[in-house]
Amino acid sequence: MYAGSTIDVDYVWLILRTDATRLVEDEPLLRHLLDDVVFARDDLAASLSSRLARRLAREDMTRAELEPLFNSVFGEHPELVSASARDMVASYERDPACFSPLEPLLFFKGYLALSTYRVAHQLWLDGRRWLALYLQSVVSEVFAVDIHPAARIGSGILLDHATSFVVGETAIIEDDVSILHEVTLGGTGKESGDRHPIVRSGVLLGAGAKILGRVEIGTGAKVGAGSVVLNDVPAHTTVAGVPAVIVGVAAEQNPAIEMDQRLQCRKLVRPD
């Protein structure tokens, strides 16, 4: 559905409508949800706005207030819709339990949390920081995902399961990264400035990995589940342990796409 950092959003929307039509025939009890999120909407931006507002609405800020907010931000920044479309396709293509791009839109809290982050990040850039922090707070309560709106996150991101995923203020995540639940991209203390990790493209972060401080996870690297990373990780290497150490060269060129969480790797070849 996409190549590189580009994606045909209209084609993704067509697939969503087609799958929704099949779904409502198979499961009529979901018609009200599908009518609201898909059939009554003209495009992916409106569909996202509807779904996010429906999930995040509360007495503090009603759906009638949230949905126009999301619509406005997506309308003024279509690149955010493209990024969310790439995230959706990443979920579909990398998660073997996902049988349609429609699933992330309807059910995947990692995807919905990330889509909300994109709106909050734009609000942060626009100087509407209190509103951005409000969205961060609600997402943390509803989805158990805590992403600071100032963090910088690329597209084509898979947040698989996503529970307890935490991203600090100065963290950077590049395109095409896959992240399992309970991952933390955190700081190491009270210092100010750039104090959170940089995750380069193609990286796979295993469940429960903790990456602390302004360390860099190089392109195509793999971090094993439960590891604590305190130092830079070279590109295309695999690290594991507490604290994490290099255990070899990543067996895959792009671990984020392959999604193989085993620590299979090629041994490092050391010169004589």
Image: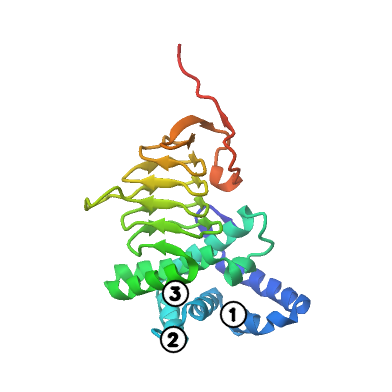
Label 2: state its secondary structure: loop
Label 3: state its secondary structure: helix
> Which residue is under mark 2?
62
Q: Residue at x 45, y 11 (%)?
A: 272
Q: Of the residues under marks 1 and 2, which one precedes in the sequence?
A: 1
Question: Residue 32 vs residue 205: left or right?
Answer: right
Q: Which of marks 3 and 1 is in front?
A: 1
Q: Is residue 176 among the parts visible in the rendering? A: yes
> Which residue is under mark 3?
74
Query: Which label number is shown at residue 45?
Result: none
* x, y percent for residue 210: 42, 47
Question: Residue 170 vs residue 205: left or right?
Answer: left
Q: Measure how far apart labels 3 and 2 are at the Cα level.
A: 18 Å
* x, y percent for residue 63: 47, 85
Question: As drawn, which residue projects farthest toward the right?
Answer: 26
Q: Which amino acid does label 3 sit on?
A: Phe
